[in-house]
Image (cartoon, rainbow, N blue to C red):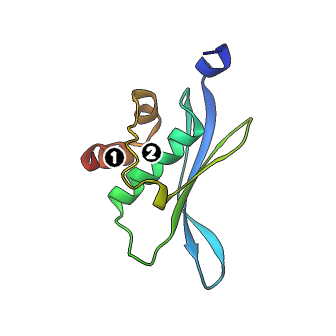
Amino acid sequence: MTCEDTNPRRITWEVQLYEPVSRVWMCEAYGRATTTAAPADIAHAVLAGYLAHHPPRSTDTYRALARPDHGPAAIVRADQLEDDGWTAGPDVRQALPVYLREALAAGT
């Protein structure tokens, strides 16, 4: 682990729904966090919590993006969440808003 891994960074996250008619990704939820967690972990937790709080229809396509101020964005699709054995660590849960944190805890 390097010192860059332990310094908090600002991350902006979005949950997006694909609109097939217009072929665009529409923002459904948006937030920011300052955390030491990896952007991919934030995107995973945000999407899992959002889908637990707002169950999707079978025709919906969701994804989450987590963009740090410096560095590449992480994208997680809903189909990547199914039974992958991932668990949110305390730094990830701390970065989530309360409604996503509670939905994520209820879904586990």
User: Given the image, on which type of amino acid does mark 1 rest?
Assistant: Leu
User: Given the image, on which type of amino acid does mark 2 rest?
Assistant: Ala
Tag 2 residue: 45
Label 1 crowd bin: few (<14), some (14–19), many (20+), radius 10 Å? many
Query: In the rendering, at what x and y percent does residue 32 appear?
Result: 57, 42
Q: Which mark is residue 104?
A: 1
In percent of the image, x 36 and y 42: which residue is there?
A: 101
In the image: residue 1, left or right of residue 92: right
In percent of the image, x 33 and y 58: which residue is there?
A: 53
Instruction: Depth check: give the residue in front, 84 or 40.
Output: 84
Question: Split into 4 quadrants, where in the image is the C terminus?
Answer: top left
In the image: residue 22, left or right of residue 47: right
Q: Is residue 24 above or below residue 38?
A: below
Question: Split into 4 quadrants, where in the image is the N terminus?
Answer: top right
Q: Is residue 44 above or below residue 9?
A: below
Query: In the rendering, at what x and y percent does residue 87 appear?
Result: 38, 38
Q: Are marks 2 and 1 in contact (CB under 8 Å)?
A: yes
